[in-house]
Image (tube, rainbow, N blue to C red):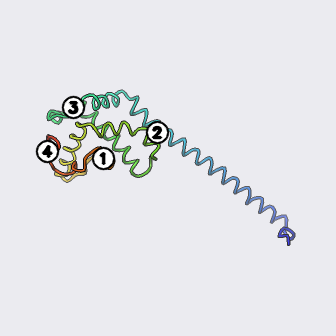
């Protein structure tokens, strides 16, 4: 029994319209997927350009890499250009870790910039600075500004879990908490 025997022109036109809409929907889905990939690529390019080609960011990363003792008790006495640049870079890393944590950045995208974030996480001065900020912010009952970055470091075992304790044997205490 052929189901098309009793069809009218309207039935055939409706079927063609449904097939056309399905094909159009597939093309729209392909275009949408392509535009998302392009936007993700542009976003990753912006992050890379900021990390690798921004002169201030590169200079700050160089300080973190080549001067393991930049964080001293004098660091907090005046809000210097170095303090501003360190805060700016760590805020950027924190934001990237936040995006990674909420899965707005996939692993393969994060992996492109992971090396820079890991270098900062393993820096003794960065850890000492974050430890001081973390415990100071807890004392004044404010959230620590760099928690996504800290949590990433702990999760990846670059920052010891004891970091969250107020053990003054871990780092020099430069802030009053």
When the figure is inspected, residue 153 is found, relative to residue 59, above or below; the finding is below
Which class describes the residues within 10 Å of circle 3: few (<14), some (14-19), or many (20+)? Answer: some
Q: Give the residue pinned by disc 1.
A: 157
**Which residue is disc 4 drawn over?**
169
Task: Looking at the image, tell me whether mark 1 or mark 3 is earlier in sequence order.
Answer: 3
Reading the image, the residue beneath label 3 is 70
Q: Secondary structure at mark 3?
A: loop
Sequence order check, earlier mark of 2 and 1: 2
Mark pair 3, 2: CA separation: 29 Å
Mark 4 or mark 1, earlier in chain: 1
Q: Position of residue 36 (x, y in %)?
A: 54, 46
Which mark is first along the chain, 3 or 4? 3
Q: Nearer the viewer, mark 4 or mark 3?
A: 4
Quick check: marks 4 and 2 in contact, CB under 8 Å?
Answer: no
Relative to residue 36, is residue 137 drawn left or right? left
Task: Tell me if label 2 and label 1 are in contact, CB under 8 Å.
Answer: no
The residue tagged 2 is 44
Is residue 107 shown left or right of residue 81?
right
Tag 2 secondary structure: helix
Q: Report the mark closest to the observer, 4 or 2.
A: 4
């Amino acid at each position: 029994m052929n189901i098309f025997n009793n069809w009218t022109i309207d039935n055939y036109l409706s079927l063609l319209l449904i097939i056309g809409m399905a094909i159009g929907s597939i093309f729209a889905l392909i275009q949408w997927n392509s535009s998302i990939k392009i936007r993700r690529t542009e976003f990753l390019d912006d992050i890379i350009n900021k990390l690798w080609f921004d002169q201030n960011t590169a200079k700050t990363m160089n300080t973190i890499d080549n001067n393991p003792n930049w964080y001293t008790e004098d660091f907090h006495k005046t809000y210097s250009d170095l303090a501003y640049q360190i805060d700016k870079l760590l805020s950027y890393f924190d934001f990237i870790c936040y995006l990674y944590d909420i899965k707005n950045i996939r692993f393969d995208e994060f992996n492109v910039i992971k090396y820079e974030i890991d270098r900062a996480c393993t820096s003794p001065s960065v850890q000492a600075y974050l430890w001081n900020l973390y415990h100071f912010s807890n004392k004044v009952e404010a959230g620590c500004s760099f928690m996504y970055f800290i949590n990433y470091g702990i999760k990846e075992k670059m920052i010891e879990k004891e970091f969250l304790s107020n053990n003054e044997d871990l780092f020099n205490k430069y802030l009053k908490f």
